[in-house]
């Protein structure tokens, strides 16, 4: 049987991840994934659909001919999927105070997303150019947007507030939080795995090249480490996490005055790369015996553990911790070092389960349950899109 097909687009600055979902059955069933790495030449669409791997060369420059590149992607996928591509769904990093859930993209929504570029200048444009490219090349395809910030709209105003004049808060200068699509998936997955635990006080740790921590009660966001931007919170591969504003004032007085230079510094020269001087990749650093590499890992684990503890303060306690994303799902040593710093809370890992990346890695005596749950942002994007499309009867 042929079903209608939905494509999900998760756009980054250097890559485009694509999910393929059958939706004619009333649910979003994943049938394949594909990816373009914009840093390779020539461009290639690489993926697997229905268990069959494929690779297609794409023609055109990803900057000047992006619309044509996207058109080729859709044509290639249309030739290999079992069904008709009827919709496209996009991950958009920032929803500002305008969007607290997924939406159908029309002219007004597109303008509103565009108006938020200044809040996420390195992330928002990537999604916008895919949306526009699909619009131009395939205008008959319905499009939806899912926002990384929307999951955190359930937080109390006092949690989202910065200690700045109220008028600035009302104008949108506030803590937003990110990685919301990942946390939405974890909340749902944990409810299926351990519903009683999911109903309680849970801290999820999305640890990848970008990293954050989110405190949830009953699967709803109550606090998170990232704030106004994706720079805040725990250290990341190349981003600093918390940084004293006074340090930035000092750097500006020392000559780093241009916003573009400061932006480059904060997004690409800090974090684990900055501390180690070697790499922002924890896999590389864990294999390096140097003092600098060790210190970078120690700092990362210290800050993650400290943020979990801070989240517990907001939640009023802690029942479970979930590790997810590339580092969280696959690096037992990182999880072990974080857990070791939380022993005072009664958290204890089973070393064998941790090394095996088991779903539950805490001991039976641990006061806090610890899970490893792979995340799937594309599934959340597809599910949210289907709910929007069903509501609009498209």
Image (cartoon, helix red, strand yellow):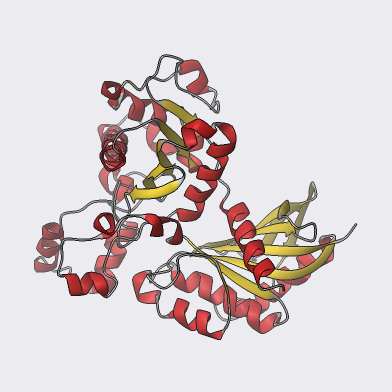
Q: Is residue 39 visible?
A: no
Q: Position of residue 63 (x, y in %)?
A: 54, 77
Quadrant for residue 311, please give it. top left
Quadrant for residue 70, please give it. bottom right
Q: Position of residue 223 (x, y in %)?
A: 33, 49
Identify the residue at horizontal 47%, vertical 45% (top origin). 219
Foreground residue among 376 and 17: 376
Q: Count the labels in the image.
A: 0
Identify the residue at horizontal 73%, vertical 81% (top origin). 140
Q: Position of residue 216 (x, y in %)?
A: 40, 44
Question: Which image quarter holds the C terminus?
Answer: bottom right
Identify the residue at horizontal 38%, vertical 71% (top origin). 121
Residue extending furthest toward the right: 1
Foreground residue among 198 and 134: 198
Residue extending furthest toward the top: 365
Question: Where 47 falls versus 67 (above or below)?
Answer: above
Drawn side of residue 199 relative to residue 3, left or right = left
Q: Position of residue 283 (x, y in %)?
A: 44, 37
Foreground residue among 284 and 28: 28
Q: Is residue 221 visible?
A: yes
Question: Where 378 falls versus 96 (above or below)?
Answer: above
Question: Where 48 falls versus 373 (above or below)?
Answer: below
Question: Which image quarter holds the N terminus?
Answer: bottom right
Drawn side of residue 260 relative to residue 78, left or right = left
Foreground residue among 38 and 31: 31
Drawn side of residue 193 relative to residue 173, left or right = right
Drawn side of residue 7 relative to residue 350, left or right = right
Identify the residue at horizontal 65%, vertical 69% (top origin). 391
């Amino acid at each position: 049987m042929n079903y209608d097909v939905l494509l999900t687009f998760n756009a980054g600055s250097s890559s485009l991840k694509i999910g393929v979902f059958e939706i004619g059955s009333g649910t979003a069933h994943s049938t394949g994934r594909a990816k373009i790495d914009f840093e390779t030449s020539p461009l290639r669409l690489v993926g697997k659909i229905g268990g069959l791997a494929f690779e297609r060369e794409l023609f055109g420059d990803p900057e000047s001919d992006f619309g044509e590149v996207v058109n080729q992607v859709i044509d290639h996928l249309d030739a290999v999927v079992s069904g008709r591509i009827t919709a496209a769904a996009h991950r958009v990093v920032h929803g500002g105070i305008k969007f607290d859930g997924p939406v159908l993209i029309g002219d007004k929504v597109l303008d509103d997303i565009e108006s938020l570029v200044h809040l996420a200048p390195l992330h928002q444009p990537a999604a916008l150019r895919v949306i526009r490219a699909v619009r131009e090349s395939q205008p008959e395809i319905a499009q939806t947007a899912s926002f990384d910030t929307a999951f955190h709209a359930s937080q109390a105003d006092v949690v989202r507030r910065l200690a700045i004049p109220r008028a600035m808060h009302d104008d949108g200068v506030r803590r937003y939080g990110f990685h919301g699509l990942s946390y939405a998936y974890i909340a749902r997955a944990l409810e299926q795995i351990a519903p009683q635990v999911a109903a309680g006080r849970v801290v999820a740790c999305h640890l990848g090249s970008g990293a954050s921590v989110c405190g949830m009660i009953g699967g709803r966001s109550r606090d998170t480490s990232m704030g106004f931007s994706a720079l805040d919170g725990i250290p990341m591969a190349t981003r600093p996490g918390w940084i004293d504003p006074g340090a930035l004032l000092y750097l500006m007085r020392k000559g780093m005055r241009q916003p573009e230079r400061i932006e480059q510094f904060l997004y690409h020269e800090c974090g684990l790369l900055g501390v180690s001087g070697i790499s922002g990749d924890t896999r590389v650093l864990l294999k390096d015996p140097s003092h600098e590499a060790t210190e970078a890992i120690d700092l990362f684990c210290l800050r993650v553990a400290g943020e979990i503890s801070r989240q517990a303060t907001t939640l009023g306690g802690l029942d479970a911790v979930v590790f997810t994303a590339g580092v969280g799902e696959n690096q037992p040593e990182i999880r072990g070092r974080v857990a070791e710093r939380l022993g005072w809370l009664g958290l204890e890992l089973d070393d064998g389960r941790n090394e095996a990346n088991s779903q539950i890695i805490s001991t039976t005596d641990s006061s806090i349950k610890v899970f490893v749950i792979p995340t799937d942002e594309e599934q959340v994007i597809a599910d949210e899109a289907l709910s929007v499309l069903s509501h609009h009867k498209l």
